[in-house]
């Protein structure tokens, strides 16, 4: 039986079923099972090989040529999809985002002066002012909102709340007290000129109000006219 | 098999030797150097065998033609990476086999259920229920057509790991060595798969043997 298995394996592996090895030919002469196996295998192989054999269509070459031209044109732009280019694009996008964020944060602003002592800054008036009100002559190095006096009443002019990253400019300060006069009573906030300060507006009064110009960069408060 | 370098085989096909006389390796070396004539010659030599092979794997002529063309496109685009360690026919049949198997897997993922094979075996492959028709057939042409269709259906119903091996062996006539290289299997595994495939085919085609 083991011999039959080996013989059948040899019959199965033969290249040409019509030409069996001598050993197999001798064996199937006296073994009906192996003889039947050889006949079945031959018939099966002929049946499978005799199946319809198809050929390529007539336009095979033309279509192939067109497809190949497409592939070539795609390959000429291979670098568009390359990982290196994608990495470069991502790095560029990241850089743009960082620059935008930095611009938004004002890191490139020319108003940024290097940090100095607060007392020194208070000594830099830009314009001499006549006899400031006594209550306004307090040392503004103390972080309290500046106040303008109108008659007997005092108004909060601006509360300067610094942002963390801009602590070096006007941290807890307002304009020098000498620039605020008795007739000062309003605030004009000029967009983009006040730094990144949060300025609290005074209570709205009815009627004409004096207008003050508060500049964070120059750290001055000027009276620029009336609201009417 | 001795490794053959591309440089040694690089030839000018437009010169003294014609493309028809060049070997496959020489043609590949010329394709790598941008010779379109060499590529046309390779296509001329292999378009029919490759189309037929893929057709016997898929039993779908239109798709077989597309995949045969895709095979040649891959030959062209990867000519520079071609290693001439074994015959080119093995190389191109490997590309075609991989494409055909990918197509079969893609079709399998679609989970189409054939009316002929609603059941699957342990490997998840469809088992075709094709009881032999014992009635007398009327005409020799009909007999031939029916036999061809039965063979095609029987091959298509084989598990794909057996299918590639049996088609390469009994349809395309490749040697065990070439099939082993094409499928990247050992020769013993190839022999085993072919034997198993024939046993399955014998059951399915018993009415025609």
Image (cartoon, coloured by chain):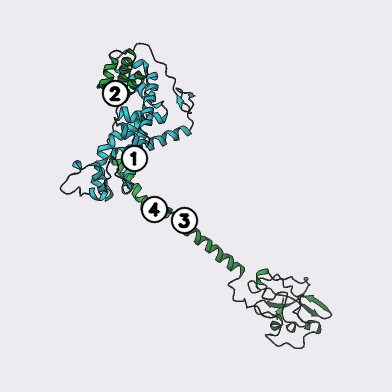
Chain colours: A green, B cyan
Is any atom of residue A56 visible in this view? no
Q: Position of residue B148 (x, y in %)?
A: 33, 22
Farthest residue, direction left: B16
Helix, strand or loop status at disc 3: helix
Of all chains, the one bearing label 2 is A
Horizontal arrangement in the rendering, residue A113 relative to residue B150 (left or right) = right
Q: Please tell me which of labels 4 and 2 falls first in the chain.
A: 2
Q: Is residue A86 left or right of residue A20?
A: right
User: On the rendered structure, is A83 left or right of A16?
Assistant: right
Depicted A145 relative to depicted A1: above or below: below
Q: Are marks 3 and 2 in contact (CB under 8 Å)?
A: no
Q: Chain of mark 4?
A: A
Q: Chain of mark 1?
A: B
Of residues B124 and A10, the one nearer the viewer is A10
Q: Which mark is residue A86?
A: 3
* Disc assigned to residue A50: 2
Question: How many other residues sit within 10 Å of disc 1, few (<14), some (14-19) or many (≥20)?
Answer: many
Distance from Cα at disc 3 to Cα at disc 2: 53 Å
**Which secondary structure, mark 1?**
helix
Residue A140, position in %: x, y?
75, 80
Label 3, residues with CA under 10 Å away: few <14, some 14-19, many ≥20? few
Look at mark 1 in the image and give the residue it sits on: B71
């Amino acid at each position: 039986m083991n011999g039959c298995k080996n013989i059948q394996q040899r019959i199965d592996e033969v290249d040409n079923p019509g030409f069996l090895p001598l050993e197999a030919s001798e064996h199937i002469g006296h073994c009906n099972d192996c003889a039947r196996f050889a006949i079945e295998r031959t018939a099966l192989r002929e049946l499978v090989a005799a199946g319809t054999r198809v050929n390529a269509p007539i336009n095979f070459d033309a279509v192939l040529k067109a497809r190949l031209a497409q592939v070539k044109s795609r390959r000429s732009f291979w670098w568009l999809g390359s990982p290196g280019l994608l990495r470069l694009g991502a790095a560029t996008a990241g850089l743009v985002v960082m620059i935008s964020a930095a611009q938004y944060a004002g890191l490139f602003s020319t108003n940024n002066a290097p940090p100095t002592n607060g007392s020194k800054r208070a000594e830099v008036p830009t314009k001499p002012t006549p006899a400031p009100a006594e209550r306004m002559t307090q040392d503004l190095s103390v972080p309290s909102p500046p106040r303008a006096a109108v008659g007997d009443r005092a108004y909060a002019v601006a509360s300067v709340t610094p942002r963390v990253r801009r602590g070096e400019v006007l941290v807890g300060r307002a304009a020098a007290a000498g620039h605020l006069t008795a007739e000062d009573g309003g605030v004009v906030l000029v967009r983009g000129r006040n730094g990144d300060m949060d300025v609290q507006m005074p209570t709205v009064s009815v009627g004409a109000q004096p207008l003050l110009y508060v500049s964070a960069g120059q750290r001055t408060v000027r009276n620029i006219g009336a609201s009417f | 098999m001795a490794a053959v370098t591309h440089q040694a085989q690089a030839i000018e096909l437009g010169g003294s030797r014609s493309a028809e006389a060049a070997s496959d390796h020489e043609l590949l070396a010329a394709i790598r150097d941008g010779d379109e004539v060499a590529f046309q010659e390779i296509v001329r030599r292999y378009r029919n065998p490759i189309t037929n092979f893929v057709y016997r794997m898929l039993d779908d002529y239109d798709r077989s033609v597309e995949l045969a063309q895709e095979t040649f496109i891959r030959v062209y685009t990867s000519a520079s990476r071609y290693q001439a360690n074994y015959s080119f026919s093995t190389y191109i049949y490997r590309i075609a086999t991989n494409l055909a198997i990918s197509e079969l897997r893609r079709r399998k993922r679609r989970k189409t259920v054939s009316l002929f094979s609603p059941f699957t075996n342990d490997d998840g492959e469809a088992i075709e229920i094709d009881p032999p028709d014992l009635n007398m057939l009327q005409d020799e042409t009909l007999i031939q057509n029916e036999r061809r269709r039965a063979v095609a259906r029987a091959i298509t119903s084989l598990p794909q790991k057996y299918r590639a091996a049996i088609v390469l062996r009994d349809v395309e006539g490749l040697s065990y060595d070439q099939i082993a290289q094409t499928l990247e299997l050992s020769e013993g595994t190839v022999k085993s798969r072919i034997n198993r495939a024939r046993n399955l085919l014998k059951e399915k085609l018993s009415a025609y043997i």
